[in-house]
Amino acid sequence: MNLKSLFVLICSMAFSSLTSVAQSIPEGSKPAVSNVRGAVYPRIFTDYRASFQIKSSKAKKVQLQFLSDPKPYDMTQAADSSWNVTTPPLVPGFHYYSIIIDGFSVNDPGSETYFGANKQMSGLEIPENNVDYYLINNVPHGSVQEHWYLSKITGHWRRSFVYTPPGYTAGAGKRYPVLYLQHGSGEDERGWTKQGHANFILDNRIAKGEAVPMIVVMDCGYAAVEGSTMPTDRLKGIKEFENVLINDIIPDIDASYNTMQDRAHRAMAGLSMGGGQTLYITLNHLDLFSQIGIFSGGGLKGFNYKTDYNGVFTHVASFNEKVKLLFFSAGTAEKPYHDATKEIHTQLDQAGIRNVFFESPQTDHEWLNWRRALNDFLPRLFK
């Protein structure tokens, strides 16, 4: 298939899927909340199955591929030329996915797109039953704004997404503590609000009086300097972001927002890659941070509290005095991360280092896991 034919195929598929409805809509299902406006598919069943439909008369083979599952689902062509598949029950939460048409991966025109795996991808939200802590509720809402700044370190314009709590007024006398909150590998500064709904979690916790009103800064964890490429070496990448965070982001946020500018009121947390960044940066800058959150942190396997991070954990009394909160979390279904995190927690407990370990039942390395972690972490901050 040449590029022109492929383009025509994709365009016709998009038009058809947005203007056509299957001959029979599966009973007991409803459109996913992650659909674009007016899209009938994908559909979610009460038992967490999901039904997908693509309209294309020219395709020879169509498959559904979840990012977390290496094996695609084959879709079946119906008499009206639609391609259909219904999955087994899926884990509640957020799932990246693609449609594969004759070997070419495309986004589902019925779904919103989200930045993951270093590209825009379709996303499917499987809601948890009877859970609303990450949903928009009838409570006072904070604001999320794009904050652009020119990095002296990289030579690039960079962007933070900054949450300010309900009642925040720029230039007013009241000042707020700050949480620097990082995304995972292949994602960016948009993830915590678009996929993670961090702003709604904050709104809901603050409205109930369960979290201190705070400013939350979400920035891109990749920070290559002008003219260079992104490093493949994990530690080199962390150090590049460390340089930007310490010398660009924190001073700029303190100059631009009503922040409390001491270590007692500054925290950092992150998921996966961002968790690894958080642990490295905070432990090397305890003069700047007093509260630390690692959600499914990357690079934790083989941890040794006596030698890692220049032996900072061997100074038990000093560490416990400086660090007011050391929080670890992992989902029970993400076994390598869970086991490594639990081992760190056990070692530190035995050494006398105060720390918290939160387990998310039955969640894997995905966004529901980290929503739960943030929801448990926030009430512990700045208390």
Image: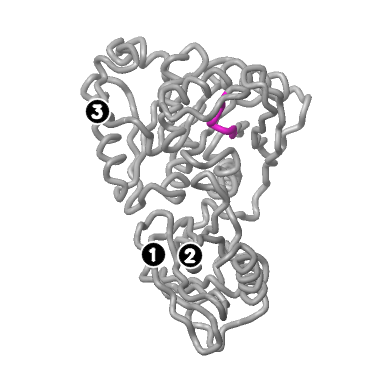
- Distance, label 2 to label 1, CA atoms, is 9 Å
Where is 82 relative to 311, above or below?
A: below
Q: Are marks 2 and 1 in contact (CB under 8 Å)?
A: yes
> Residue 100: which disc?
2
203 relative to 285 in the view: left or right: right
The reply to whether the magenta stretch includes residue 231 is no
Disc 2: CA contacts within 10 A as few (<14), some (14-19) or many (>=20): many
Q: Residue furthest left?
A: 350
**In this view of the protein, which residue sits in the foreground, 55 or 265?**
55
How far across and down, in percent of the image, does residue 240 sit?
52, 21
How far across and down, in percent of the image, does residue 365 sit?
38, 47
Q: Which stretch is magenta?
A: 218-224
351 relative to 87 in the view: left or right: left
Which residue is tagged 1? 72
182 relative to 350 in the view: left or right: right
- Distance, label 3 to label 2, CA atoms, is 38 Å
SS class, disc 3: loop
Which residue is tagged 3? 302
Mark sitting earlier along the chain (1/3)? 1
